[in-house]
Amino acid sequence: MTPRIAGVAVMALAALLFVPTPGVRGDPLPHLPGPAPQARPQGFSARTENQRCEGCHEDIAAEWRASLHRQAFTDRVFQRSYAIEPLPFCRGCHAPEADPAHHPGADAQAVGVACVTCHLVAGEVVSAHGRDARGSAHTVRGDARLSTDEACARCHQFDFPEAPGAAMQDTVAEHRAGRFAARPCRDCHMPLVQGSTGRAHRDHRFTVLGSPALLRSAIDASASRSGANAIEVSARVIAAGHAVPTGDMFRRLEIRASAVDAEGTTVATAAPVILERRFSVRAIDGGIERVPAGDTRLPASGAPRVVRLVFPAAIDGLAVRWEVVYQRMGAAMAVAFGIDPAADEVVLAAGTLGARPGLAGRPAPIRVP
């Protein structure tokens, strides 16, 4: 992303601000949490204020410390990307407790998207359900919007600045157009859990990549043979409220298959098929510009995506192993970032098609090194 992109993108994010509605007291509700700047008072320390939250809310604090929100700036993948493009646009969401015009200080880096980022707004502690100070350390102002998709939109829904109307991240819009639009994001990403006191609360780990089971539950897939030298894999969204994968524009699914003999030795490999968002790239002053050029991901509607994997020769006498694999980025980009591609992979679905008798006169499969 270029400075030109960054400046316009920040303006696009600002346009997503939720229009305040009257609060219980009759005065306007504060803006929902989002990218920097957070309009903090002079001398405000995000780390110090956040530690005050952690001191009383121990269960939630432990969950947050294990979350990607806490690692928003320190995450190894983000750091590799940020080293290439250290832009204010990136800092706005990944270090929201700092001035995005400058590299964030140690406190803002350490807390990432913190407790205070979402729950300390305009000097007030805010949650989906308010309460007065009786029996607690402070008053909590209720803002029901925090339980809706609007609480996520300002950092998870925004356009490419050079192509208005073309989303750089489209998760919230995908959800609104999907089968589960009536269910808020938090139902999957902040499920109710029991705390150490026995009281239920929303899980603040915001787990996605850290929960292979959650990722696997999002889709269903099956495979069948297609002619003498190919198989077809059909995959569809069954539980996710958005396209799969969603979020960062480089996330993708790789569908791959290999033919194996009776001993389980791989005899042939099909060319993999990638389901992803595609972009055209062109040079502009000071950097590059990416514009959406296609989308083959699994749609939120649940419509199946059927792909054909072709082997170099007939595979009738061989079993075929297939799998649908979630990847944060392609192998070439991972290598460029110094990341082991296999370390970030999650197998979402897999299976084996049994061998079937070959037909007379059909050439035997070739062995692929």
Image: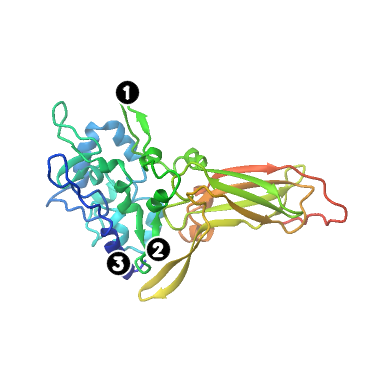
> Which class describes the residues within 10 Å of circle 1: few (<14), some (14-19), or many (20+)?
few
Specify whether 266 is left or right of 67: right
**Residue under pointer 2:** 166
Residue 60: x and y in percent read 30, 34
- Specify the amino acid type for callout 1: Gly
Q: In the rendered view, does 354 fall on the left or right side of 278?
A: right
Tag of residue 277: none
The numbered disc on residue 8 is 3
Q: How far is the residue under mark 2 from the one under mark 3?
A: 13 Å
Q: Is residue 181 above or below residue 366?
A: above
Residue 240 located left or right of residue 15: right
Q: In what element is the residue under mark 2?
A: loop
In the image, taking residue 212 as reference, residue 157 lies left or right, namely left
In front: label 3 or label 1: 3
Question: Do the residues bearing badges 2 and 1 touch, measured as CB atoms within 8 Å?
Answer: no
Identify which amino acid the numbered label 2 is placed on: Ala
State the separation of the CA atoms marked 2 and 1. 45 Å
Counting residues from the start of the chain, the first of labels 3 and 1 encountered is: 3
Identify the mark nearer the N-term, 2 or 3. 3
Relative image position of residue 308 (x, y in whole percent)? 65, 55
**Badge 1 element:** loop
N-terminal-most mark, 2 or 1 = 2
Q: How many numbered marks, from 0 up?
A: 3
- Please state, as top left, top right, bottom left or bottom right, where the C terminus lies in the image: bottom right
Determine the secondary structure under disc 3.
helix
**Distance Cα–Cα, label 3 vs label 1:** 47 Å
Instruction: Tell me which corner region of the image, top left, top right, bottom left or bottom right, holds residue 285.
Output: bottom left
Tell me which residue sits at (27%, 32%) in the image: 58
Residues packed near mark 2 inside 10 Å, few (<14), some (14 to 19) or many (20 plus) = some
* Residue that label 1 marks: 198
